[in-house]
Image: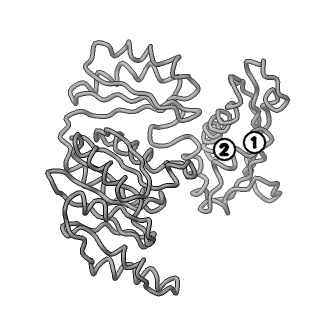
Amino acid sequence: MSIAILATGDELIQGDTLNTTSQALAHTLSAAGLPVGLHLACGDTEQQIHECLAFLAQHHDIIILTGGLGPTSDDRTRFALARFLQLTLVEFPAAIAHIQARLARANVGMNDGNRQQAFFPEQAVLLANPAGTAMGCYLSAQQKMFILLPGPPRECLPMFKEQVLPLLELTRHNDKQLLKWRLFGVAEGQIAQILDDALSAIDCETGYRLDTPYVEFKVRCQDSDVDEVMQIIDPLVAPHIIASPEQKASERLRALIKDLAEPMVIIDDATGGALQILLQQPENYMKLSFQHRPNVDLQFHLSGLKEYWSQHADAAVTSLTIKYQNNKGQGSETHQIPYRSPLVVDYAAEWLSFRLLHLIDQLHE
């Protein structure tokens, strides 16, 4: 089984919009152990979409199309697919009801463009879109599966994860497991050879993905080899682990802050706002302040990265200091971190998140 992704839209071809949707779909599919083949992007014309479908269908069992499901004259994806499959487009009453309900919320009436969004190939199964008028669909034809999703990531990605991915997982015939580690503070070139050599005697596939300041290390292996792989890899990567494969340190800290019984203050004189961007969200806004609040017991003052801010590019290390206090006492700690590039700010923000997690636990004991 092989999966292809076709993203449609002149804005992608012309460089006006970065195609993050295909990247997110491919990453999710790969993480689920579903093989991804080609990615293509094309313009809005029906002929271009038709030609791409003809090309991809030669070598792929499943084709995911994104974009071109809107209400305007240049939204031609459904028409191209129907033409390619030699199927008739029919109006789905459930799609009409969905569109009318979405338009009523905005006090907008139905027009011919909106009605266009209710047409799908006659064999299609609709996919709900809670965030927009453009429903998606999937259908099997010519011994292949075709999946249509709207282009905007805020609509496409939740629909894919909640409705399409479970469907695709039923098609998987793969006895291999995917293992992941999130490594911190180590370059791909520094660690890849060590890990690949350590696993050279095992029938497995390794992969690496940079997610600054982390490197995601992946191993796909037979179920019977999982324990051996973990026994080999865990000790090698232990010095580089500050987060789980599922959550960065900043994501874990963000969730912890939301659940704190009392608010906390972080005065950040180190990262220039990078830490606040990572941590502050609507759900924890009332629990976290980056300004002085005298009546808050739990407070942190972060300083450092002097070499970065003074542009000492030849420095090999830089320092971070954390001063902390609550109603039980106060203290401080200073640590040196490597200074390899301006990305030291991203490194510092994740490392500080890791340390703050431990200090919060310690101060609440």
Up-down relation of residue 253 to residue 310 (above or below): below
**Residue that appears at 41% across and 17% down:** 195
In the image, residue 134 lies at what x, y percent?
40, 69
Q: Mark 1 points at which residue?
A: 324
**Is 271 on the left or on the right of 56, as rendered?**
right
Q: What residue type is labelled 1?
A: Tyr
In the image, residue 261 lies at what x, y percent?
62, 59
Near-viewer residue (265 or 153) = 153
Up-down relation of residue 297 to residue 28 (above or below): below
Point out the frontmost of discs 1 and 2: 1
Colouring rule applied to residues:
one colour
Q: Residue 208 carries which label?
A: none
Contact? badges 1 and 2 (CB < 8 Å): yes
Q: Quadrant of residue 77?
A: bottom left
**Is 274 on the left or on the right of 143, as rendered?**
right
Disc 2 crowd, CA 10 A, few/some/many (<14, 14-19, 20+): some
**Is 161 on the left or on the right of 331, as rendered?**
left
Q: Mark 2 points at which residue?
A: 363
> Considering the image in quadrants, where does the N terminus appear?
top left
**Residue that appears at 42% across and 47% down:** 41
Mark 1 or mark 2: name the one nearer the start of the chain: 1
Disc 1 crowd, CA 10 A, few/some/many (<14, 14-19, 20+): many
Up-down relation of residue 243 to residue 45 (above or below): above
- In the rendered picture of this protein, how many numbered marks are placed on residues? 2
| Tag 2 secondary structure | helix
In the image, residue 14 lies at what x, y percent?
54, 49
